Amino acid sequence: MSVPERQSPESTAPPVRHPFARLGLPVLTVQALRREGLTDPLPIQEAAVPDVLAGRDVLGRAPTGSGKTLAFGLPMLARLAGRPAIPRSPRGLILAPTRELALQIERALEPFALGLRLGSAVGGMPTNRQADKLQRGIDLLIATPGRLTDLVEQGAAVLDAVQVTAVDEADHMADFGFLPQVRRLLDATPSDGQRLLFSATLDDESVQDLVRRHLRNPVTHSVAPEPTAAVAVHHLLYVETADKPAVLARIAAREGRTLLFVRTQYGAEKLTRRLRDQGVTVAALHGGKAQNRRLRTLAAFADGTVPALVATDIAARGIHVDAVSLVVHADPPTDPKDYVHRAGRTARAGTTGTVVTVVTPEQRAEVTALTEAAGVDVVIHTVGPQDRELQQVTGARSPAGTPAAPEPAAPGHTRPRSGTGRGYRTADAPRPRRPHRRRKK
């Protein structure tokens, strides 16, 4: 008598679906995610992707570093797939407050475009090139409000074919005064188009007005940030004014990606020169830099070639570089919101990080009030340049001592001699004399 062969449980179990596939994303997109090493969706992605795929208007509250770019970007690409690009008329639109953020969104979505044409329209780059690319056809355009407004007014961009629009970092749009332009751009898109709005906070009245005017019965997904103390530890370093330069030099010389914030462009250049003279590999980032120089600086910081970056608050508003393990307020901010935005450059996507504020005696009362208003718990240390406690908190170490190489010049650019260059004159440089022309009689 033969005994029937028992079927193993494995052969009857349904195949295990990839976590991203369960959200409804296409197979090719899921495969691209796997190639990029992305296996599990983050909370905002798990919440928002199905509704965006279903064509619903979505209002998302999620902090920086939560994965919101893919939360709206992946389903947008899926919804745009399968149709040809239209000259001058993108079918998808993402509005971002800064050119750095717009370009980072484009890079983040590029691996998942899968035949769709992506393009950006941002300031600081040639308008003609962006207009030419639009003329050839772009499926998904990532733009800053100002440059896109210029292109629309020139007739280089037409928004009447836009099917889905995402407004990213709406709170920063409000901070920069861009919401009037955003409203005009949304008015230029079809009224029955899908609208997505993502922001770290939604309590700004102008943001709420934008939602009321342009989103129809939106599904709201709120991913509250973890308590700051759980992922980032905040320290106040009380230092003597005379010790501050040495303390900053030792902190900047540490291992790991370090972001130091100052208040002004001049302060960024001054601190960068001082650190480089002591052997720290560091670069400056601020609005006074040419756009191509800023992009190269960001790329060098992101890949670790330049491990330390001195930046003004522009970096806190639109730059997203992962694995920043230490944020340093070399100049304490004056606004609690700026403190939060700066600190948000570390402890991203569930990782840990450290935030330190270097405080001189005359700043103590001001910084205490600042951190209380920002709602963060701080650990206070009184340190000097050689103190072990400074090393324990920040990883500080002695800089190399040998001056580091200067930042590379732009391709084809020759550094001006004697500190002078086009458009600039040193204080002791003589004013060029105009050639004498003999008057005709």
Image (cartoon, grey):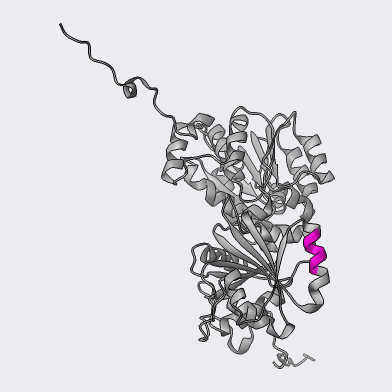
In this rendering, is residue 103 above or below 401?
above
Q: Nearer the viewer, residue 152 or 403?
A: 403
* Residue 422 seen anywhere in this rendered image of the structure: no
In this rendering, is residue 49 above or below 247?
above
- The x, y position of residue 108, in whole percent, is 53, 49
In this rendering, is residue 345 above or below 141?
below
Residue 429 falls in image quadrant: bottom right
**109 sits left or right of 187 in the view:** left
Task: Please tell me which residue is depicted at 71% across the width and 50% down the height of the picture.
Answer: 145
* On-image quarter of the C terminus: bottom right
Magenta-drawn segment? 367-372
Query: Residue furthest toward the left?
Result: 1
Q: Nearer the viewer, residue 77 or 302?
A: 302
- The x, y position of residue 13, in whole percent, is 38, 22
Q: Nearer the viewer, residue 190 or 157?
A: 190
Dominant secondary structure of the magenta stretch? helix
Q: Is residue 41 magenta?
A: no
Task: Please tell me which residue is depicted at 58% across the width and 50% down the height of the picture.
Answer: 350
**92 sits left or right of 266 in the view:** left
Q: Is residue 368 magenta?
A: yes
* Residue 164 seen anywhere in this rendered image of the structure: yes
Task: Please tell me which residue is depicted at 81% across the width and 78% down the height of the picture.
Answer: 362
- The x, y position of residue 283, in whole percent, is 58, 73
